[in-house]
Amino acid sequence: MKIHEIKRKITVGFGKTVRQRRRELGLSEEELAWRAKISDRELRNIEHGRANPKADTVISLCVHLNISTDEFYNIYPEEGFDYV
């Protein structure tokens, strides 16, 4: 697997996790974006796998969505670890 494919899987996986957890918590995009101090547009791009968020944004979203680091690291595709 190539590096860009691994990055894409991580970005898409994180976005799906964010969207799923946000919905489970009953938060609107606007509410979560406000809490995480990012724009609505940035959150939508993250949720749809079109943005590669900065570490600060990832941490903020994980905190506000109560996503543990274990859950976050499970987003990484295991097959990519052999390549790196």
Image (tube, helix red, strand yellow):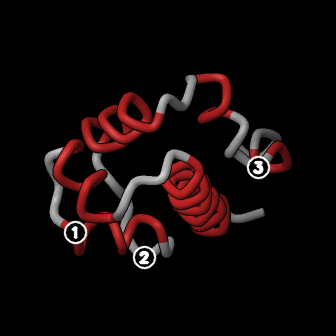
Q: Which residue is mark 1?
A: 40
Asked if marks 1 and 2 touch (Cβ < 8 Å), the reply is no
Question: Counting residues from the N terminus, which is met first, the one under dot 3 or under dot 2?
Answer: 2
26 or 21, nearer to the observer:
26
Q: Is residue 7 visible?
A: no
Q: Nearer the viewer, mark 1 or mark 2?
A: 1
| Callout 3 touching callout 2 (CB < 8 Å) | no
Gap in Å between the C-alphas at discs 3 and 2?
Answer: 18 Å
Mark 2 neighbour class, 10 Å CA radius: few under 14, some 14 to 19, many 20 or more? some
Residue ID for mark 3: 77
**Regarding mark 3 in the picture, which secondary structure is present there?**
loop
Tag 2 secondary structure = loop
- Of residues 10 and 25, the one drawn nearer to the viewer in this rendering: 25
Apparent side of residue 29 relative to residue 78 in the rendered image (left or right): left
Question: Which of the marked residues, 1 or 2, is nearer the chain's N terminus?
Answer: 1
How far across and how far down the image is residue 70, in percent?
Answer: 66, 23
**Left or right of residue 72, residue 47 in this image:** left
The residues bearing labels 1 and 2 have C-alpha atoms spaced at a distance of 13 Å
Tag 3: amino acid? Pro
The residue wearing badge 2 is 50
In percent of the image, x 40 and y 54: which residue is there?
27
Quadrant for residue 29, please give it.
bottom left
Q: Residues within 10 Å of mark 1 (few under 14, many from 20)?
A: some
**Residue type, label 1:** Asp
Instruction: Find the distance from the CA under tag 3 to the CA under tag 1.
Output: 27 Å
- Residue 81, percent across and down? 76, 39
Image quarter of residue 53: bottom left
Quadrant in which the C terminus appears: top right
- At horizontal 17% and vertical 51% (from top left) the residue drawn is 34
